[in-house]
């Protein structure tokens, strides 16, 4: 596979601390994403009704988006090191499916309800929170499992 | 929407259940006792996250986990030492699941020379 032959893949395959650093950065991205989407989803589901949703969104949405960007970037770097082998893992494809669902559902939610969720209707949108929560947690679990099935 | 959620939870559960054995992290999957294999290298995939070589041991194919690049280098091994067709002797722990024919090497011998991947393990 061409990805695996790329100079970056070859470099990361042989590197010690650089590879460890990409690993750590991937965890940072996941931590930022899940750590900020979790409270936001729980707020949509109905927790902390006294805390203003928009203020929460102002902080957590950029944090989650940056986390996703870091996770995707470093995730690609980790993938290309052993692209051929990883591409055969069903758990990886399952993880990517969850990420696509989570990403699309976030796009739809923000198109519908505004970037800062300031156009939320009076009726509850708890289901949006539940879908997002389950999707991102599932992606995290699938990601962790990759290390245990290779 | 509810149905969709059930499907997602189900899939996550399935992924957990379907993982074919929890291997390679640490030593929890190995027996705790050493075995000794000598064979011919059939293929080698070296590099992060961990090196794996396939070894022909008297007609039986064994999968042997060797070190990451830094560990092999520290032991004194070069990538070319793992070239296809070379003979190597491995001492290490096999998988508890003996049908897997998988072992994690602690020491490697080429001829009489010893290469210690894990100097603190016997």
Image (cartoon, helix red, strand yellow):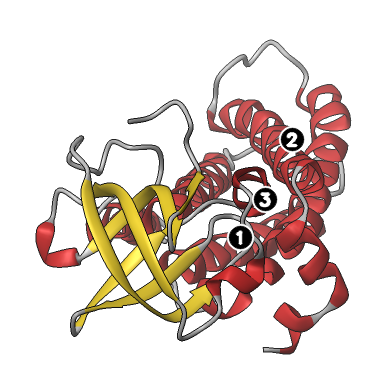
| Residue closer to the observer: A122 or B70 | B70
Tags 3 and 1 on a common chain:
no
Left or right? Give the position of B91 relative to A95: left
Report crowding for label 1: few under 14, some 14 to 19, many 20 or more residues within 10 A (C-alpha): many
Quadrant of the image occupied by residue A29: top right
Whether residue A147 appears in this view of the structure is: yes
Q: Nearer the viewer, residue B122 or B114?
A: B114
Q: Which mark is residue A28?
A: 2
Callout 2 crowding tier (Cα within 10 Å): few <14, some 14–19, many ≥20: some
Which label sits in the foreground, 3 or 1? 3
In the picture, the disc for residue B71 is none
Q: Which mark is residue A99?
A: 1
Residue at point 74%, 35% (across, down): A28
Asked if labels 3 and 2 touch by Cβ distance under 8 angstroms, the answer is no
Between B18 and A96, the residue placed more toward the observer is B18
Please say if B120 is above or below A5. above
Q: Position of residue A32 (x, y in %)?
A: 74, 33
Q: Are marks 3 and 1 in contact (CB under 8 Å)?
A: no
Whole-Å distance between the Cαs marked 3 and 1? 37 Å
Which residue is under mark 3? Answer: B73
x, y percent for residue B88: 40, 67
Label 1 resides on the chain identified as: A
- Taking the spot 49% from the left edge, 42% from the top edge, the residue there is B116
Are labels 2 and 1 assigned to the same chain?
A: yes
Local SS, label 1: helix
Discs 2, 3: same chain: no
Residue A139 location, x and y as percent? 52, 52
């Amino acid at each position: 596979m061409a990805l695996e032959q790329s100079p970056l893949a070859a470099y990361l395959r042989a590197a010690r601390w650089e590879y460890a650093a990409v690993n750590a950065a991937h965890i940072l991205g996941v931590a930022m994403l899940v750590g900020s989407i979790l409270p936001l989803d729980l707020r949509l589901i109905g927790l902390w009704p006294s805390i203003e949703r928009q203020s929460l969104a102002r902080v957590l949405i950029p944090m989650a988006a940056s986390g996703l960007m870091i996770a995707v970037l470093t995730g690609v770097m980790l993938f290309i090191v052993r692209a051929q082998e990883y591409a055969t893992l069903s758990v990886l494809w399952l993880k990517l499916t969850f990420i696509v669902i989570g990403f699309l559902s976030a796009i739809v939610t923000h198109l519908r309800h505004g970037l800062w969720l300031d156009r939320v209707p009076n009726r509850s949108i708890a289901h949006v929170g539940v879908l997002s929560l389950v999707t991102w947690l599932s992606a995290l679990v699938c990601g962790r499992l990759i290390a245990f099935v290779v | 929407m509810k149905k969709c959620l059930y499907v997602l939870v189900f899939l996550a559960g399935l992924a957990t259940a379907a993982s074919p054995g929890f291997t390679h992290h640490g030593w929890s999957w190995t027996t705790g006792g050493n075995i000794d294999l000598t064979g011919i290298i059939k293929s080698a995939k070296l590099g992060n996250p961990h090196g794996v070589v396939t070894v022909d041991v008297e007609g039986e194919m064994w999968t042997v986990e060797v070190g990451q690049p830094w560990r092999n280098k520290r032991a004194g091994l070069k990538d070319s030492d793992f070239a296809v067709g070379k003979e190597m002797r491995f001492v290490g722990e096999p998988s508890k699941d003996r049908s897997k024919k998988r072992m994690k090497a602690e020491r490697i011998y080429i001829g009489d020379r010893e290469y210690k991947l894990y100097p603190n393990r016997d």
